[in-house]
Amino acid sequence: MGSSNKKKKEKQQDFKKTKLKVGKAKVKPANFTDTSFKSKAIAVAHQSLSETAPDVVQKFKHHLSLAASSNSDRQRKDALAFLTSQLSAGPDSNPVGTRELLVKLLPSVHAEEALRWIRVGMTHLSTDVSLDALSVLEWLLEVASDEAVACPGGWVMTLNSFCAMMGWSASGNRGWTSAPKIGVRTKDAACHAQQLTILAKFLKAGLRPEAVVKVHPGQYWDGLYRINRSREPFAHLNIYGARRDGDGEMYQDRESRNRAFQKRYAALVLAGAEQAKREAGAPGRASATLMQVLRDSTGDSEGEGVLDADDLLHLW
């Protein structure tokens, strides 16, 4: 009986309001945590835990080496992110110089990937973007012309972009026509001349005669039984890549490139050059250069009239 009364009193204590007396602090709960303390710290800029921490130049060179030669894609991505943030900080943020930076990074950019974005820029509606893309293509032809015209899509797709940029198109049975110009870039004589000049350089790189190389007697057997040391020696077979159409194929020799050019683009380019030749000034001079390249590159060609793979498939 007494225990039950005791429990009732304990329960009533929970709901009983405590009377506070003047001058006395409120009773703190049992789980009270004191948070009134404060801490002080000193933050030093560019602090390091090591007395021999690498300086900015060594750190930049380390990330540059990782971006150029690391086998891990995550390391290359992080290194490129560091280089991007470092170079965008200011004009004097490159401690190794532009030349060393380009020498390290440019070989990592494949010609196929570079041409893909160049073609996008060539057909852009903005005049400045189109001209910048042509300038990049001109640089690519100077440093890696063979790779640019022989990579997948490097020949046919780039010629398609040139024709679309300058408004050249075939109109079925009616023959060649000049499509409406895009924007104002083709109305400018200087822009049109630059387009014709770089087209001439591109055709010269793809249709120039191949150098005759003397073959050592042992090289015949080396080609049969030894593994080719070049990068992606069987890329033309496209074993693991996505299926390509005719425009995305690789044209690795002059004969195949000339065959594709004569079949699809020779009449378009010749008619466009003839039309530009009638204009005075820079476009006329550029068209004369283009026609000279066509005469020099295709004059001694034997590829015209030869059946290609598409023609053989149609005969089946």
Image (spheres, rainbow, N blue to C red):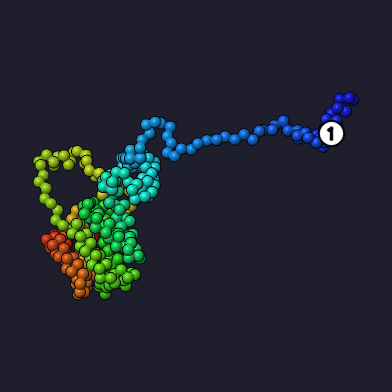
Using the rendered view, name the quadrant where residue 299 is placed: bottom left
Choose top left, top right, bottom left or bottom right for residue 4: top right
**Of the residues shown, which amino acid type is indicated by label 1?**
Gln
Q: Residue at x 19, y 53 (%)?
A: 253
Q: Residue 21 versus residue 136: which sits nearer the camera?
A: 21
Q: Position of residue 300 (x, y in %)?
A: 11, 61
| Res 160 quadrant in image | bottom left
Is residue 152 in view from this perspective?
yes
- 92 on left or right of 140: right
Residue under numbered circle 1: 12
Of all residues, the one furthest to the front in this rendering is 23
At x 33%, y 52%, the residue is 243
Using the image, determine if residue 145 lies above or below residue 78.
below
Q: Position of residue 104 (x, y in %)?
A: 28, 44
In this image, 241 relative to 296: left or right? right
Q: Which quadrant is home to the N terminus?
A: top right
Q: Residues within 10 Å of mark 1 (few under 14, many from 20)?
A: few
